[in-house]
Amino acid sequence: MRLVVGECIADLHPSEAGGVGDATTYTRRPGGAPANVAVGLARLGDAPRFWTRLGRDGFGDFLADALAAEGVPDDLVERDEEAPTGLAVVGRDAGGERSFSLYLDGTASVELRPGTVDDALASAEWVHVGGVELAFEPARSAVLDLLDRVSGDATVSFDPNARPGLWREFDYADTLDRVLPAVDVVVASAEDLRPAGFAGDASELARRLVDAGPHTALLTLGPNGALGRATADAPWGTGEADHGGFAVDVIDTTGAGDAFTAGAITALSEGRALADAIRFANAVGAASTTAEGAMAALPDRESVESVLAG
Ligand code: ADP
């Protein structure tokens, strides 16, 4: 069983280029990086358990319905009777590039409590944790507690999803120092690492990441695919592997990193070797860019196979 932990929030998308103050109207879409990963796994054929928390409000109902429609079991989808559901207000520049402003502090998203999912943790073979929860209490304590308790037999993956503006109460670089030794696989982009002072080319970044603790580092490189490095502790082979990505007709790259993560978790837990898993994850990432939206554009196996077949 695979367990995903982190935020599921409603993204408010502007109806036209611009954002607050420019856009005339907004529409809502389900979002949150860990939610995208959970749904990405489901579309690839899994039924991952997803520990998240929603408000008992209209946005919470909307998100709970969206997860249920994707076949994500609801047993760890908590509802908070007081705190509202977390939100993101999305901006879009003229080139189509999106920016996300998050409303998280004091929301249900960061009301995860330590010890709540110990039973699920005991039977999880893979645990994936998103980074945003680490910026706020009590979710930070809940995630750190979970990392301390997870069984040595489970593989733990982590996507820092850095958003420099979120880090007020806690220091991002110190948090990575605390978390990286407790995880097996880190999936990151160069933008996730820059605020923590990690510099260099992809190969150097991957080397620095595995030096910090995880046995495997996967670095996503947008249209240029991804690079991975694994040490001798990794079950899928040692050394560096890269794959230059797939050329597809890109419509919207939002959520491509989450699609890649779902693909990597799927491929590595199916026993594929590192290089093959990176190729598969790139195909999932590329396929997700061929349709509008983040969660909506996550591909099923058939779409991934057609990218792999060229
Ligand atoms: P993030 O969405 O976290 O910024 P990236 O932009 O690096 O992450 O994208 C994640 C993955 O999605 C890449 O490693 C690649 O496999 C795929 N991808 C992203 N953009 C493109 C693109 N323009 N063409 C093909 N594949 C892409």
Image (cartoon, helix red, strand yellow):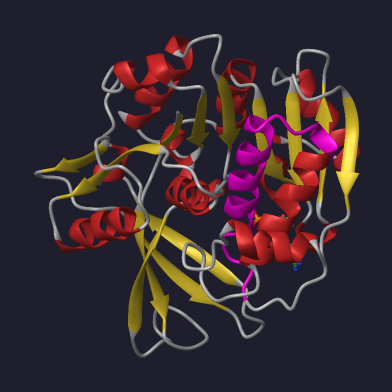
Q: Residue at image x 51%, y 64%?
A: 294
Q: Nearer the viewer, residue 23 or 50?
A: 50
Q: Nearer the viewer, residue 190 or 251?
A: 251
Q: Measured along the vertical axis of the image, is residue 174 above or below residue 104?
A: above
Q: Residue furthest left?
A: 81
Q: Quadrant of the C terminus?
A: bottom right
Q: Measured along the vertical axis of the image, is residue 21 above or below residue 71?
A: below
Q: Residue at image x 47%, y 67%?
A: 296
Q: Is residue 46 magenta?
A: no
Q: Quadrant of residue 266?
A: top right
Looking at the image, residue 156 sits to the left or right of residue 32; the answer is right
Q: Is residue 273 magenta?
A: yes
Looking at the image, residue 242 sits to the left or right of residue 121; the answer is right
User: From which residue to which does the magenta span run?
Assistant: 252-275
Q: Measured along the vertical axis of the image, is residue 259 above or below residue 227?
A: below
Q: Residue at image x 62%, y 80%?
A: 96
Q: Quadrant of residue 270?
A: top right
Q: Position of residue 1 (x, y in %)?
A: 45, 28
Looking at the image, residue 201 sits to the left or right of residue 45; the answer is right
Q: Position of residue 76 (x, y in %)?
A: 27, 35
Looking at the image, residue 236 sits to the left or right of residue 68; the answer is right
Inspect this view and state whether residue 67 appears.
Answer: yes
Q: Measured along the vertical axis of the image, is residue 87 above or below residue 276?
A: below
- Mainly helix, strand or loop, the magenta region? helix
Inspect this view and state whether residue 106 appears.
Answer: no
Ligand 1 is in which quadrant of the figure?
bottom right
Q: Position of residue 155 (x, y in %)?
A: 58, 21
